[in-house]
Image: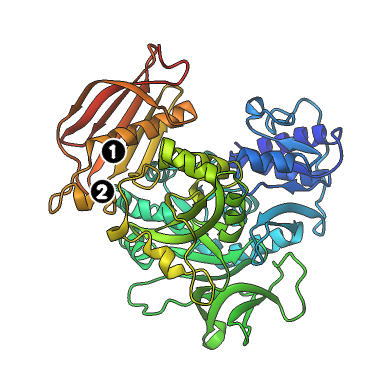
Amino acid sequence: MKWADFRDHVAHLAGRLEHAPAGPCLVEVTDPYALAVSLFALWNVGRCAVLPPNLQPGSLEHLANRTAGVLSDRPGSRTLAPAIDPLDAGSERSPLRALDRDALALELFSSGSTGDEKRIPKRLRHLEDEVDQLEELWGPRVDRAAVLSTASPHHLYGLLFGVLWPLVSGRLIHAQPILRPSEVVEGARVLGECTLVSVPAHLRRLAQHRNVAALEGRCRAIFSSGGPLSQATAHAMAGATGVTPIEALGSTETGGIAWRAQRPGDARPFWNPFPKVEVSCNPETGTARVRSPFVSVGAPDFGFTTADLIELLPEGRFLLHGRSDRIVKVGEKRLDLSAMESDLRTHDLVADAALLLVDRAGESRVAAVLVLTPGGERLLCAEGRRVVTVRLAEHLGRRWDPVLVPRLWRTVSTLPETERGKRSIASLRALFEPSLQPPPASLEDRPEVLETVRDATSVQRRCRVPESLSCWPGHFPGAPVVPGVLQIDWAMDAASALLGDLPRIREMDRVTFREPLRPGDDFWLRVDLEENGWIRFRIWGEHAEHTSGHARAERPGLTG
């Protein structure tokens, strides 16, 4: 698209919005270009854009009920309120006006340090001033390079770095969402020069991609935010591309706070506050206070207090030492463990719940410890743990982003406590130690999915066998292989992405196990839905066929 096309799309959508009911609009688009059109059209007619924290049905339904309208790039797929397609808004036009810096521009959402999800307003000046600072800091380094972004534009970091900054500075934006490392490599090849806006999980996978070295000489800058970037990933990306990633620290409330670059030889990589930001330390709590023109919520004169634990260094720099609350980062998304625990307790299968983070293959995963109600106990005995955890995962999936839903589950008669009656984190964590793990459970013994391609009747995944499967100690000691039943379980999990829920197998046919799968093996898994109701699956590697077969499900419409 050219600048004239953008102005034309904004004018048409603004013309449509001038005749729509007054009030804020929910913007639930996934295409960065359509998002930019939506925002500038709303601002042109003096309206505020509400960006959802995720695109889960429960979140969208809740926000649609409290907004005056909905903008969506997939209006035909909605079952809720009618929506306007921002790129197909009709023939009316509205003249483009100068925007008011003090106008309310955005409503974003945050878990907040106090627990409850809260609305975070942003005025246009907050966004404009921060974009100006990004250009001042890194504009010369980025130069005219196009922007490739794997960060969600619904969150402040992805919106500022991946959409508004390049748009205001006249740089090209790769408009299609990028999900796989191969798409980054191919995008850089096509564009010639690029700036990569990403998050730690994507950069970790990109650093392991076989063609990551193709980015050398093509990437002018690499940005990361949403959580700390591991030193190993930072050094791997710098070694492969010649560019040290720049990490941005901030929050929805504060905007950008500081940046750092982890270079080889830095024993303690410190954070540098942005030029217009002053960071101090609360002497009582050790948490950071931030005074900044980007802070968008009411803050007293001494600054906005965050939950980040810091150690001040000379010249205003600081080290980060975690957080003081139960807000955690999983897959670069912020999660309030207390809020999700409360959500679990509303389910009729759960009497009590405790959540914690555990490490699996170098990544943080949410783990759940449950005390079941009598009804939950009966279901567990009759149907097994898988049925219980799938129901609870579906319950949480109505509100929470899929990456935040627990992947590991345990059930206990009572939650462990200390002698003082406090929750025993050590005892909870011990439930997930490898030596204490129960037999394999489908929600936790999953492969690491590296890439996914799907259409209406098939899904293909590139995966890696984790080093931490709970079946390794008994299958087999000294020579671990993935059990055949678990491989079939992985295939049915892929089929559930097509069917909407997990198929219950009625019968199997032509199942063949050839070469074993071992820890760390890369493999492909493909599932096809056949017209006769069978599910065909195949698992293979670069040099070997592992497993293939057919499964017939009890699901109506797939039983033939």
* Residue 527 relative to residue 414: left or right: left
- Nearest the viewer among 53 and 296 is 53
**Mark 1 / mark 2, whichever is N-terminal:** 2
Disc 1 residue type?
Answer: Leu
Q: How many marks?
A: 2
Describe the element under mark 1 as helix, strand or loop.
helix
Mark carried by residue 455: none
Q: Is residue 447 above or below residue 143?
A: above
Label 2 sits on a secondary structure element that is: loop
In-image side of 27 versus 207 (left or right):
right
* Any part of residue 416 in sight: yes
State the image coordinates of residue 151 (x, y, percent, origin top left): 52, 50
- Image point 42% across, 54% down: which residue? 201
Verify CB contact (< 8 Å) between mark 1 and mark 2.
Answer: yes
Instruction: Estimate the spatial distance between the alpha carbons at disc 1 and disc 2, rounded to whole Å.
Output: 9 Å
State whether residue 142 appears in this view.
Answer: no
x, y percent for residue 182: 37, 42
Q: Is residue 33 above or below residue 281?
A: above
Q: Residues within 10 Å of mark 1 (few under 14, many from 20)?
A: some
Q: Residue at x 40, y 71 (%)?
A: 262
Front in this rendered view, residue 505 or 312: 505
Name the residue carrying label 1.
486
Residue bearing mark 2: 471
Residue 429, percent from left and from top: 40, 64
* Quadrant location, the N terminus: top right
Instruction: Looking at this view, name the residue that lies furthest to the left.
Output: 478
Q: Residue at x 76, y 25 (%)?
A: 90
Depth check: give the residue in front, 232 or 528. Answer: 528
Looking at numbered disc 2 in the image, what kind of residue is underneath it? Answer: Cys
